[in-house]
Image (cartoon, grey):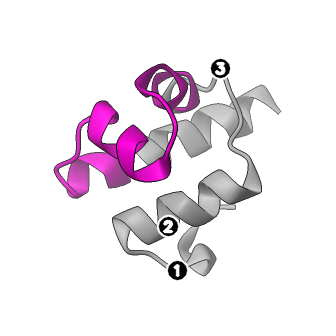
Amino acid sequence: MELLAKKLGLFVREKRKENALSQKELAHFMRTDQARISRIETGQANMLLSEWVAFCRVVGIHPKELPC
């Protein structure tokens, strides 16, 4: 499970950077805080379904494009 969290965290970081967003900006658009985005990107926290939906909306991808 830890490996999956790290893989997904790297995906979040990659898409955030592709969209030229800081962690703080992404957190604002997802209605969470920067520390949570940091924990997600480092694999220390898993995203909730509602967070995945918000993330996809913010970075402009369809949920089918998620790596898992």
Give the CA distance from mark 2 to mark 1: 6 Å
Q: Which residue is mark 1?
A: 62
- Side of 49 relative to 59 (left or right): right
Residue 56 location in percent, x, y? 50, 67
Badge 1 crowding class, 10 Å Cα cut-off, few under 14, some 14 to 19, many 20 or more, is few
Residue ID at (52%, 80%) = 62
Please tell me which residue is depicted at 83% across the width and 33% down the height of the picture.
1
Res. 67 visible in picture: no
Secondary structure that dominates the magenta span: helix
Disc 2 versus disc 3: nearer the observer:
2
State the CA–CA distance, disc 2 to disc 3.
20 Å
Give above or below for 22 relative to 11. Answer: above
Tell me, yes or no, whether the highlighted magenta stretch contains residue 19: yes
Q: Secondary structure at mark 2?
A: helix
The residue carrying mark 3 is 44
Residue bounds of the magenta highlight: 14-40
Instruction: For the C terminus, give its image quadrant.
Output: bottom right
Instruction: Decide: is 57 above or below 12.
Output: below
Decide which of 26, 15 is in the foreground and name it: 26
Query: Is the Cβ of the residue at disc 2 closer than 8 Å to that at disc 1?
Result: yes
**Camera sees residue 36:** yes
Q: Is residue 53 magenta?
A: no
> Mark 2 or mark 3, which has the lower sequence index?
3
Residue 39 in the image: above or below residue 40: above
Q: Amino acid at mark 3?
A: Gln
Would you name the residue on which mark 2 appears?
56
